[in-house]
Image (cartoon, helix red, strand yellow):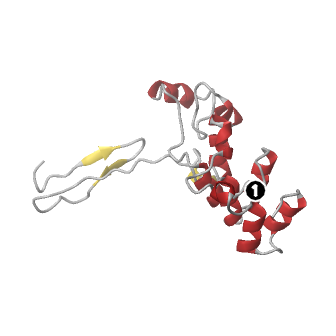
Amino acid sequence: MEPGEMVLYESHSVLHGRPFPMNGRFFANLFVHFEPLGAFRRENHDEFTNDIVYHEDSLISTEEYLPPYVIPDSPWDEQWREQNPDGWYLLNNDMGLSARKGDLRTMDNLYIQDPESIHEVDDNGWGPLHEATRGGQLDVVKYLHEREVDLNLKTGHGRGNTALRLAKQYHGEDSDVYKFLEGVGAES
């Protein structure tokens, strides 16, 4: 390519390019590809949604994971499987980070792929329950409780704080997270 030439790229439904030629001796192209795991425009272009619609069948399949935005048995299902024979997996496979952010959808996908991931701790002995508690993520704390995570597990590989103590430290005894943990019998 020479200075002054124009480059056009075609993607799924859009032609991308620079409407004017590049100047100078050097240039760079950067493409960012992403999966729409947030708000996106529906097919009719008039209807918007705030969250992706997750389809139970795409989440529960243990042999071939479909991404949550591909509807099973839709025209895109077969095409997607042909292009991705190894299935789909999350790039973010950090249960603790997802718990801290309150990202239940990612947590649920990780849990389906590996149910033991909700019990794993990091190098400092912090598990998803500790991260969710510190972040004040009540829905995540409830989610983990429903899946029988040990509410009395201590950080620091048994030498640190329980989730109830973290809730008190970070949010106080009047917080919803503290009240919930205390109400279900968590110890300090």
Image side of residue 66 versus residue 24, left or right: right
Q: Residues within 10 Å of mark 1 (few under 14, many from 20)?
A: many
> In the rendered image, which quarter contains the C terminus?
bottom right
Residue 53 shows in this picture: no
Q: Nearer the viewer, residue 122 or 54?
A: 122
Residue 25: image location, x then y, percent: 10, 59
Determine the residue positioned at 53% across, 34% down: 88
Determine the residue positioned at 70% across, 55% down: 129
* Residue type pointed to by label 1: Val
Q: Nearer the viewer, residue 2 or 100?
A: 100
Q: Nearer the viewer, residue 99 or 24?
A: 99
Residue 67 quadrant? top right
Determine the residue positioned at 62% across, 60% down: 101
Image side of residue 93 versus residue 26, left or right: right
Q: Is residue 1 above or below residue 27?
A: above
- Which residue is disc 1 drawn over? 141
Residue 156 quadrant? bottom right
